[in-house]
Amino acid sequence: MRSGRHIQQLQGDLSYLAFMPNFLPPKPPIKIDKVMLDLLSKADRFIGRLDMITEVLPDPDFFIFMYIRKEATSSSQVEGTQATFADVLKVEANIKDPAIPDDVQEILNYIEAMNYGIKRLGSLPLSLRLIREIHQLLLQGVRGKYKNPGEFRKSQNWVGGRTINTASYVPPPVSELPLLLDNLEKFFYDKSPMPILIKTALIHSQFELIHPFLDGNGRVGRLLITFYLCQQEILQRPLLYLSDYFKRYRSEYYDKLSTIHKKDNLEDWIKFFLDGVIEISKEAVNLSRKIVNLREQDVKKVSNLGKSIKSALSLLESLYKSPIITVKSVEKATGLSPSNANALVEKFGNLEILEKVGERKRNRRFVYKKYLNLFEISP
């Protein structure tokens, strides 16, 4: 098979078949038929529009700040995490809520790993070393913390099934990891002619086939997509996050990856990947326009607050990073006294910018609901 081969491990009742991926790039090469060529053309066009967001948004950091959190939530939920986007925002705003699941830390770790990786690419090339560093951050203090964070596995793992014999997929044995990972790292910088988006799809699928860690492979593999596109300067900023697409079509995502080792079909996986680039890029561009419109509307509203305008603009800007707030957080964002912060929150309520959440009288919470609605978040 072009994608790899199954190799028997152990003997007798203990025997099982592990999959040994072939080195990249694939030989024979990917067949780019008319359908794939059309998808590739559209994906290139839409990701180009997405990249232009940095020139359209007044402050793209606001958009990236929230979009990373959406990506972190979706990628973690693909792996079964129960915490939500709103839970993350509450924790970051220091809002106590006993209903927040403990596994919210997995999402917070993902955010930290994403930010760390993007910053680290400025001084360290995309490499196995960076992948290990990212993995260590992802598993710190959460599920998998005892599964050698930051280290490639030294034992056989498998995907699905209670035992290795009932597994839906058994990755290559430990003895094969060094050569496979070395090839993957070299493929990052391979100069053979290949469209970058197709190469990105292959990097993700190959990483998942190798499954080099005991836990966290899916999350690391999805982070690699953004890191590679940024390193290749397809994106000036980390703006493309496919985890929401993979979560939306979770069954198809796993099916398409499975067809690689089951049916030697790389092309269907790549087409699915390109569809995702198109769909998510379109959504991100539309979302950015809605954010710009909302921001312009609300800046006009607070511009009529007279002497309060300076503090009002400071509060409005802070809401794009912390859309769930308390009066104390308003004090911190604006430097106002408690009474003046209360008065400003009241004005924002009258302007229909902020809404009160719940009925509590102490430590009241307020939400920039129209903004959260753009991300389809329920506070």
Image (spheres, helix red, strand yellow):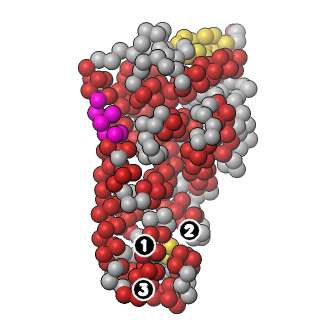
Q: Is residue 178 magenta?
A: no
Task: Name the residue that disc number 1 marks.
Answer: 316
Q: Amino acid at mark 1?
A: Leu
Q: Is residue 113 visible?
A: no
Instruction: Locate the C terminus and report the quarter of the image it occupies.
Output: bottom left
Q: Is residue 44 magenta?
A: yes
**Magenta part of the protein: which range?**
41-48
Q: Is residue 290 visible?
A: yes
In the rendering, at what x and y percent does residue 304 appear? 32, 83
Instruction: Tell me which numbered mark, 2 or 3, is placed earlier along the sequence.
Output: 2
Residue 184 versus residue 220 in the image, above or below: above
Q: Mark number for residue 93?
A: 2
In the rendering, at what x and y percent does residue 353 appear? 36, 75
Instruction: Tell me which numbered mark, 2 or 1, is placed earlier along the sequence.
Output: 2
Mark 1 secondary-structure assignment:
helix
Nearer-the-camera pick, 180 or 158: 180
Which of the 4 quarters of the picture holds residue 272? top left
Nearer-the-camera pick, 217 or 301: 301
Task: Name the residue that disc number 3 marks.
Answer: 308
Q: Amino acid at mark 3?
A: Ser
Nearer-the-camera pick, 252 or 211: 211
Mark 2 secondary-structure assignment:
loop
